[in-house]
Amino acid sequence: MFRGVLQDISILKDSLDAISSLITEGTFEVSKDGMKLVSMDPASVAMVILNILPTIFLEYNVDKTQNMTVNLSNLVTILKRARASDTLTLELDDNKLKLKMVGDFKRSFSIPLIDSSISEQKIPSLSFKNKIEIEPSALKDGIKDAAMVSDCVIFETSPDTFTIKSLGDTSETKMELTKDSPSLISLQLTDPMESGDIIKSKYSIDYLDKILKGAKSADQISIQFSTDYPLKVKFTAVNRLQLGFILAPRVDTD
Amino acid sequence: MFRGVLQDISILKDSLDAISSLITEGTFEVSKDGMKLVSMDPASVAMVILNILPTIFLEYNVDKTQNMTVNLSNLVTILKRARASDTLTLELDDNKLKLKMVGDFKRSFSIPLIDSSISEQKIPSLSFKNKIEIEPSALKDGIKDAAMVSDCVIFETSPDTFTIKSLGDTSETKMELTKDSPSLISLQLTDPMESGDIIKSKYSIDYLDKILKGAKSADQISIQFSTDYPLKVKFTAVNRLQLGFILAPRVDTD
Amino acid sequence: MFRGVLQDISILKDSLDAISSLITEGTFEVSKDGMKLVSMDPASVAMVILNILPTIFLEYNVDKTQNMTVNLSNLVTILKRARASDTLTLELDDNKLKLKMVGDFKRSFSIPLIDSSISEQKIPSLSFKNKIEIEPSALKDGIKDAAMVSDCVIFETSPDTFTIKSLGDTSETKMELTKDSPSLISLQLTDPMESGDIIKSKYSIDYLDKILKGAKSADQISIQFSTDYPLKVKFTAVNRLQLGFILAPRVDTD
């Protein structure tokens, strides 16, 4: 038995919307600790890690840990039908997820559970050389700039600077945020001993665009990377949910 | 001779816009009682009944009853060119409909009359088991919900409840309005003796979407139906015009 | 060496946006008098004449007159990336145009200079029979009206009236502005002796649409023409730039 009631639907809708641009089916582990989803995109380039905390719910009852696999774009389409003032109830039936929206009138939706074809995903253990907290709009601007001349973006940190750049055949773009930039909230290097080093890695703009759709309701955004190493992007909406993405680097193979 | 002058163009434009999504040519009967149009869509699924009352016009002169057939999408395109403050004059020439818009400057448009290829339409005599007055936004929401899982919607009334639902292969949607819902203005059954019965019929969502485009300027919206029987949708803009649609039911043939 | 710094990017962006819908490459003559561009569209139907005055810049340094050819749509795409509060620096390197935007953070862009394949253009000497100053929105409305029934528009002046009209196979549109219309700022005939004559010429709507994109930041708009003769459209943003277009007439050849 699982039943959850929540009032602010937007954060759930925005997070699942971002995720559904990367993966089509999602398996939630529903337990007393909340609803968790760990999944790899079909091309094995990006991993999604979502934790919906029980504190997001007005009521949250679950008697045993269970898995629930649904088509995410179906789920998002239904969540988008909610009115802002609606209260949403999620309920797990034998083979169905029922969604009830109650406001001016009562609405109910049911979508089938799917037999998950995907085995459980493990979150890889990664060690990063830096951690950047940044205003989402600045990060988006830097990536959009880069998109004009290339399909991938280069992230680079020196001890005092975070740079987003791209190199096209003949054109270039560069955005530089220093510790003075109001948009750069913090910039830390993990190992201050190596602080002279430039840390630099390249990522797909297409994937970053999809990932950044998840930033809408975030209070904080952090990114972490190392040279030619995966990128971790983490959105936190305090007390409500954490949404993380791990994105493989683009490494030039000549 | 026909000449009509009107100041609030929006209601005429919105009504004709809805109608033009169902029928391409429209024959108006222009008489002292106003401008009337009764027409069936090419697939014979929906009938349009429009009465533009003489009271909508500032000036309205017609010396004899006459028919005027025009291409409706041409007419709507021209009406959309009007500025909000413009005064519109409609005038019937030998073989042309002239439209003049006067505001900051003078504009005139003329479109050709068409030889109507369609014989006159009779409004069928129908008897309905119920009558529902409803907020347009609630009706639209219910139909949009249904559109997620099916191409047709089921309308159902019990003595106290109006339900809009749909059944997909594996998914379902349901919106329930009771007499407590602020969006349900009234719900009446025609024959209170049969009040125990469920009245239930199925209609095409595609057609309903087109019909509901006519709701923009409506003060009141009513719908009426019976089990496996046509639906009547009626928009009233008091003292200005009445716009009705009759839509054939979808009956399952197994 | 050329370096220009400017704060209000919008006027430059809007002007180049309009121009880039007509020509793909643009050669600017950069001198102490500002940045000038004179170019013909590939079909030789429209000529673009742009003067960006040194007064638009906060700082403007140029040591010798030089030509700079760039892909205009690349340049416009970059200018569109600017934030409203950004300060833009243009700098000419050996073979690159560098754009720096400084606001909350620093951004830089570089695009390659192109070897211009087009020889210098001369502005033709033309004598017009009239001059009309008009509100851009009225001119746009008249042209949009005409676009419903034809792909070309007829401009016509009599001593007191400016008329924009079009003739389709069966439909017609006409917009009449007299000296009383608030949208018609002024109407002058060059040679009052010939004032009884109707001056009338026909132009491509497709080209006019592109040209009118340049009207966004204009303080004043004037048009000038003669019978079956080119049209001159001129936008002036006082003390900042002048943008002119010369458009060949459509002459019926039967």
Image (tube, coloured by chain):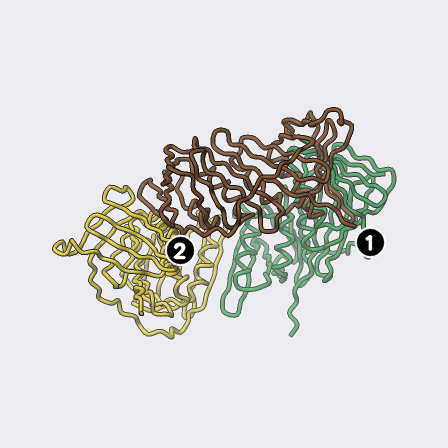
Chain colours: A yellow, B green, C brown
A82 and C88: which is toward the camera: C88
Both marks 1 and 2 on one chain: no
Instruction: Say which chain tag 1 marks.
Output: B
Label 1 neighbourhood size at 10 Å, few (<14), some (14-19), many (20+)? some
Cα separation, mark 1 vs mark 2, equals 57 Å
Q: Where is residue C158? Give x, y as percent.
A: 74, 30
- As drawn, the label of residue C53 is none
A254 relative position to C28: left or right: left
Q: Where is residue A25? Give x, y as percent.
A: 40, 68
Q: Is residue A6 visible?
A: no
Q: Residue at x 50, y 36 (%)?
A: C51
Instruction: Please name which of the two marks, 1 or 2, marks the residue nearer to the observer.
Output: 2
Q: Quadrant of residue B199?
A: bottom right
How many discs mark residues in the rendered view? 2
Name the residue tied to disc 2.
A149
Q: Where is residue C126? Give x, y as percent.
A: 64, 36
A187 relative position to C14: left or right: left
Q: At label 1, which amino acid type do we have?
A: Ser
- As drawn, the label of residue B116 is 1
Label 2 neighbourhood size at 10 Å, few (<14), some (14-19), many (20+)? many
